[in-house]
Amino acid sequence: MAQLELFLQTLISGFLLGGLYALIALGMALIMGVMRIINLAHGDIMMMAMYIAFWLFTLFGIDPYVSVFIAAPALFLFGMGVQKYLLTPVMKVESILPHNQVILTVGLAMVLSNLATVLFTGNYRSTPVNYASNAWYLTDIWKGSPIELSLSMPWTLSFVIAIVITIALWLFLSKTDIGKSIRATSQDPDAALILGVNVNRMRMLTFGIGCALVACAGCLFIPIYYLYPSLGKQFTNVGFVITVIGGMGSTNGAVIGGLILGIFESMTATYIGMGWAPVGRFAIFVAALVFLPGGVASIIRRRKLGK
Amino acid sequence: MNVFYGDVQVIWDISFEVAQGEIVALIGANGAGKSTTLKTISGILKSRKGEITFNGAPIHAMEPYRLIERGIAHVPEARRLFVEMTVEENLDMGSLKGAAKAEREKTKQQVFEMFPRLRERRRQFAGTLSGGEQQMLAIGRGLMSKPLLQMYDEPSLGLSPILVKDVFNVIKRIKEEGTTVLIVEQNVKQTLAIADRAYVLENGRIILQGTGESLLNNEHVKTAYLGV
C-alpha cells in the first residue's frame, strides 16, 4: 500500500511540475516555429520575470500570482524590442555562421544573468507567501481512504493557471486572424507575405508572446521555488529538452512533452534519487533523439496528414 | 524591369502591360525568368531599374504584404498552401485585409460553389488534399482577397491532363467574372488558347508578343514550344 501511495504521489507531483514545464516550453516552441531559432535566453527571461515578481512581493506585498499581470506585459514588450532591435538586424547579415541569431540569444542570456548578479547579488531569494505549505489531503475528503495523498495548494494553483494560459494561447492561435497569421508565418513565410501578412511584425509579436509565456511561468514558479541570478540556464535546458521531445516548433507537442518530462523527472527523483533528476532529463532527451527524432509532433502529424 | 539574383542579372529590360479585363500570358522555357517576373511584381524581389505601376500608382517600392490591399493576388508556384492548417483556415488567410475580411463568409461560399470538393473537405488539413484539390484551394485562396488582378504561377504544374483542363476552365471563368489575369505557364498551347495577349520570354528578355491566336500560329513558337 505504501508503495502505491508513493507511486501515485510521485505521479501527481510529476503532473503538476509537467504543467509548468509545458508553459516554459510553449514559448520556446512558438519562437522556434516562427523564427526557426532556439531562444537560448529563454530561461533568463524567466529569471527576469521572477525578479519582477520577487521585488513586487518584497517591496509592495503583491502576490506572485497577481504579478503575472505585470511581468507578462513587461516582458512581452521586452521580447518585441529584442526581436526588433537585436534579432532582425542580425538576420540581415550574411555570414559563414548560419545561426547568428542563436549566438545572439546566448549573449543575451549572459548579459541578463550577469546583470542580475550585479544588481541583486548572487543570494538565493524566495517569496514566503503564507499559503506556501497549505495542502489538500485525500483523507479530508474521503475519511476511510486506505492511502493518503496530498495536493499542495500553490503547486495546484500554479498548475491550473498554467492550463488556463495554455488554453487561451490555443484559442488565440486557432481562432483569431493574428493567431492564424502566426501559424502561417511558421509554415511558409513567403506565402504568408504575399497574402498580406506583415511577416516581420509577426516575428516581433511571436517573440513577445514567447517571452510573456515564460514570464507567466516564472511568476507561477516563484511561490514554490527559489531564485538566483543564474537559474535561467536550468530552465532553458528544460525548455529545450521538452521542445525536442515534443517536436521542434510544435505547441501541441510542447504541452505533451512538458507533461512527459515532469512525470519522468519526478519518477527519477523518487526512485533513483533527488540528484539524478537532471540525469533523467538528459536520458529522455537522448532517447527522444534516437527513437523519435520528430518528437511527439511527428506522431500527431502522421495521424492528421495520414502519412 | 531589371532583376538580379546577387550579381547575376536574370531579367533584362523587360516591359509589358496588362489591360483591365484581359488574360495576359507570359510563356517561356525553364529559367526564362517568368516566375522571377511575377515575384518582382509581388515585391518579393526588387527591380534595380524601372518601375511597376498598378492603376496608375507606382507599386515597385511598396512592402510586399501591402500589395494584396491594392487588389493584386498572387497564386504562387507549387501552390504554397499552409499544409498544417485546414482548408477553411487557408481560405481565411486569403482575406486578412479590409473589405475582403468583411465579406469573408460570402466570398467563401462563392469559392465553395466553384469548388464543391473544398466544401466537403473544409475541416481537413490542406496537406491531405490531392494535387488537383490543392491547386483549387490555392486558386480559391487567391480569390478570397477579391482581387482586381490575379497572377498565376504555373497553375498546371504536376496535374494530370484532365485536371489541367479544369484549371484553365476555372481561370477563364474567373476572367469572365471580371478579374484581370496574368498567367505564367509552360503549358504553351492551352495557355495561348485562353489568353487574349501573350509575351514570350527567353533568357530574361521579351522576344515576341501578340495575341494568343497569332502566337499559336507563329513559326518560332511552333518550333520552340509546340514541337510541330
Image (cartoon, coloured by chain):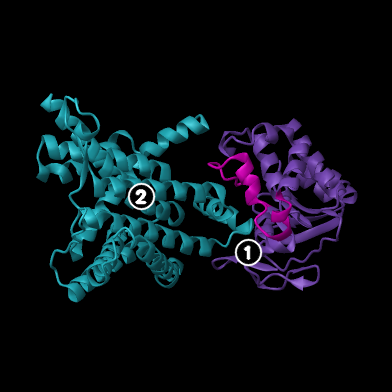
Chain colours: A cyan, B purple
Q: Is residue A50 visible?
A: yes
Residue at 69% x, 58% y: name it. B38
In the picture, measured across the screen, residue B23 lies left or right of residue B47, that is right
Circle 2 residue: A161
Indicate whether residue B97 is drawn in magenta: yes
Which x, y percent locates residue A156? 28, 45
Q: Secondary structure at mark 1?
A: helix
In the picture, measured across the screen, residue A124 lies left or right of residue B1, that is left
Q: Secondary structure at mark 2?
A: helix
Indicate whether residue A201 is drawn in magenta: no
Q: Is residue A19 above or below residue A4?
A: below
Which x, y percent locates residue B167? 76, 39
Quadrant of the rendered image containing residue A74: bottom left
Which part of the image, by quadrant, shows the N terminus of chain B? bottom right
- Disc number for residue A33: none
Residue at 28% x, 61% y: name it. A63
Residue at 14% x, 68% y: name it. A122
Front residue of A156/A50: it is: A156
- Disc number for residue B64: 1
What segment carries the magenta color? B75-104
Quadrant of the rendered image containing residue B116: top right
